[in-house]
Amino acid sequence: MAFERPEIEIHDAGVRLAIGKLICIGRNYAAHAAEMKSPVPTKPMIFLKPDSSVVRDGGAVRLPASSSDVHHEVELVALIGKGGKDIQESVALTHIAGYAVGLDMTARDIQSAAKERGHPWSVSKGFDTFAPLGTFLSADAVADPQSLSIRLRVNGELRQEGATRDMIFPVAKLIAYCSTIMTLYPGDMIFTGTPEGVAAVAEGDTLTAEVEGLPALSVSIVR
Ligand code: MN
């Protein structure tokens, strides 16, 4: 195993970028906030995953020994190509180099314990292989990131199905908001939140995640 920072490639553009910070948005679909018995946020709710959590299409998600309840969350992922600070919402989409489908794997039992204690979510969200990413296509391939269907199948069975139009905060608003807090660099990514239907995965499962117009992402679950 090489201990080197992973890179990401935009398939149809031949561009390679070192993976930067993985900014994740929680509770960005009202129906998912409801199933988590969480209030709908009045501004984007942000947490981070480490770069080391990335695993690519065809790889495996490794279940950590410290959790017995790892959930799938299918999400549209936007890759920043042009950095910025205090980016205006009106130009925010021009900062995106590409899009992919991703999974925000979550150790729900560890997250629930952290919520109770007021602790951060970093452990529950940050294990190695907890950020599977599909093949990125250039931003030109996506005419409108708010008009896409999104779904997840486990062993062929439909588990999550939604539409990006149901995001509480659209992608442009997320970029604008995040960039008021942290400077965005090329290679940073935004995981834009998951629709309802999150549930536990098991050793031996195959997850297939899809966003309309983007290459499907497939990973297996191992222990
Ligand atoms: Mn998520």
Image: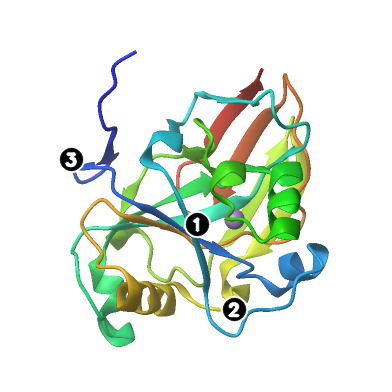
Q: Which class describes the residues within 10 Å of circle 1: few (<14), some (14-19), or many (20+)?
A: many
Q: Secondary structure at mark 3?
A: loop
Which of pointers 2 and 1 lies earlier in the amino acid sequence? 1
Query: To which residue does mark 1 refer?
Result: 76
Q: Amino acid at mark 1?
A: Leu
Q: Secondary structure at mark 2?
A: loop
One can see residue 70 in this view:
yes
Mark-to-mark CA distance, 3 and 2: 33 Å
Question: In the rendering, at what x and y percent does residue 89 appear?
Answer: 33, 84
Work out which quarter of the rendered image holds the C terminus and state it.
top right
Question: In the rendering, at what x and y percent does residue 222 appear?
Answer: 65, 19
Q: Secondary structure at mark 1?
A: strand
Q: Which mark is residue 105?
A: none
Mark-to-mark CA distance, 2 and 1: 14 Å
Q: Amino acid at mark 3?
A: Gly
Query: To which residue does mark 2 refer?
Result: 168
Q: Is residue 37 left or right of residue 107?
A: right
Q: Which class describes the residues within 10 Å of circle 3: few (<14), some (14-19), or many (20+)?
A: few
**Which quarter is ligand 1 in?**
bottom right
Kindly indicate whether the residue at mark 1 contacts the one at mark 2 (C-beta within 8 angstroms): no
Q: Which mark is residue 14?
A: 3
User: Mark 3, mark 2: which one is toward the viewer?
Assistant: 2
Cβ of disc 2 within 8 Å of ligand 1? no
Q: Amino acid at mark 2?
A: Ile
Which of pointers 3 and 2 lies earlier in the amino acid sequence? 3
User: Residue 123 is drawn in which quadrant?
Assistant: top right
x 69%, y 23%: residue: 65
x 54%, y 48%: residue: 122
